[in-house]
């Protein structure tokens, strides 16, 4: 997740454990040629993170073999191509959801990725644009990706126009898995073990689950999933991530990351908007820390069922 699953956040998730693999933020493929692999908070990985899959924003095949050769130094446990992101800035670059629409360009890119990377290759997609032909076009894309040697798909079953509105259509996985002849990782709105139990019939044909915003709000979720009685001190988690972010990022970038994380984390509390608002307008890192400390000093009540509505 852009702005969230950087090296500092992955380090925090690794402290808790419980997941099968982590995905990086969507990485501009061309940026990989410029970044310092051992220091970049987008690229570097720590051994305790376990499996790390690098998600790429690729818009053409220009220099792609050289990019993959450079990335190989980090020994990615998998590569994931973003064919899902509906953000206007990404679509303007012809990436994400725009790439999904362009079958020829998608095929060319996947072909080069497959030729130069022997490990697990996945593609993240949505349902495409909501046109009368959406279902036929989705079927065409599934076959294209299977034919080009992709190993699995992550499907966030919303239309590109939906952004995060409406509900994820998990009921589609069974037919999509059969059509793709590929394992499908389910994604979208998965709010924990209770949600999975309630949607067990729809999720049964998925080979795995991808959790996004819930992990941003509760980085301990994977550990707690395995150990439901686990007790967490949220304020200690916030402070720990703050320290990790300050360690990995330069100050202005660090402040932005603290703010992005806090928007999700604040949802854990009954009056979390107080934490959210005060940190969002903090002029610098020290102020963000002092303000969060002041909020935690009030022993804020936790929400029983925190919601991710609207973010
Ligand atoms: C702030 C934010 C950043 C995101 N960045 C990415 C990204 O870089 N790559 C990606 O594939 N999806 C990205 N997504 C989409 C999520 O991976 C996921 O598909 C979506 O949030 C639905 O899953 P969830 O309900 O578990 O969050 C992002 C979502 C949010 C809210």
Image (spheres, rainbow, N blue to C red):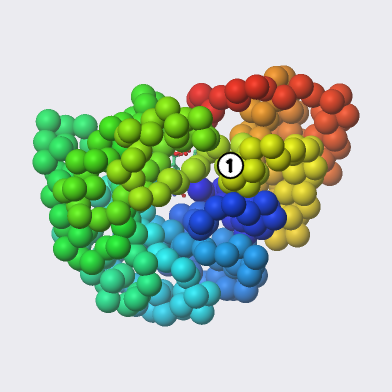
Do we see residue 161 in this rendering? no
Q: Residues within 10 Å of mark 1 (few under 14, many from 20)?
A: some
The residue at the point 53 percent across, 38 percent down is 213
Say above or below: 207 vs 283.
below
In this rendering, position of residue 150 left or right of residue 299:
left
Which residue position is annotated with label 1?
A: 225
Percent across and percent down for residue 196 are 45, 34
Say above or below: 165 vs 38.
above
Q: Nearer the viewer, residue 185 or 260?
A: 185
In this rendering, position of residue 149 left or right of residue 196:
left
Q: Nearer the viewer, residue 61 or 181?
A: 181
Percent across and percent down for residue 112 are 27, 72
Q: Nearer the viewer, residue 50 or 57?
A: 50
Do we see residue 52 in this rendering? yes
Which residue, as the protein is rendered here, is positioned at the far top? Answer: 271
Say above or below: 249 vs 232.
below
Total marks placed = 1
* Callout 1 secondary element: helix
Q: Is ligand 1 closer than 8 angstroms to the Cβ of mark 1? A: no
The residue at the point 77 percent across, 49 percent down is 240
Percent across and percent down for residue 20 are 51, 56
The residue at the point 46 percent across, 55 percent down is 26
In this rendering, position of residue 139 left or right of residue 100:
left
The residue at the point 85 percent across, 35 percent down is 293
Q: Quarter-wise, where is residue 38 in the image?
A: bottom right
């Amino acid at each position: 997740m852009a702005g969230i699953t950087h090296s500092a956040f992955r380090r925090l998730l690794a402290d808790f454990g419980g997941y099968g693999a982590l995905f990086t933020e969507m990485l501009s493929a061309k940026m990989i040629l410029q970044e310092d692999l051992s220091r970049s908070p987008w690229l570097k990985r720590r051994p305790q993170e376990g499996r790390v899959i690098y998600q790429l924003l690729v818009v053409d095949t220009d220099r792609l073999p050289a990019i993959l050769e450079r990335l190989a130094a980090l020994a990615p446990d998998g590569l994931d191509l973003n064919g899902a992101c509906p953000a206007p800035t990404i679509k303007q670059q012809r990436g994400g959801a725009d790439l999904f629409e362009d079958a020829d360009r998608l095929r060319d890119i996947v072909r080069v990725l497959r030729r130069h990377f022997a490990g697990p290759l996945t593609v993240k997609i949505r349902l495409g644009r909501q046109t009368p032909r959406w279902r036929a076009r989705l079927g065409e894309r599934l076959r294209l990706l299977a034919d080009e040697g992709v190993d699995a798909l992550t499907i966030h079953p919303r239309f590109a126009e939906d952004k995060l509105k409406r509900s994820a259509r998990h009921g589609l996985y069974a037919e999509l898995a059969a059509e793709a002849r590929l394992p499908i990782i389910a994604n979208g709105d998965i709010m924990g073990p209770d949600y999975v139990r309630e949607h067990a019939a729809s999720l049964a044909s998925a080979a795995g689950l991808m959790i996004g915003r819930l992990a941003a709000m509760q980085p301990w979720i994977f550990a707690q999933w395995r150990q439901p009685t686990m007790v967490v001190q949220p304020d200690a988690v916030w402070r720990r991530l703050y320290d990790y972010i300050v360690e990995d990022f330069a100050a202005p970038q660090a402040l932005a990351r603290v703010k992005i994380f806090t928007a999700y984390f604040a949802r854990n509390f009954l009056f979390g908007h107080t934490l959210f608002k005060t940190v969002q307008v903090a002029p610098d890192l020290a102020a963000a820390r002092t303000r969060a400390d002041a909020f935690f000093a009030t022993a804020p009540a936790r929400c029983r069922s925190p919601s991710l509505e609207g973010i």
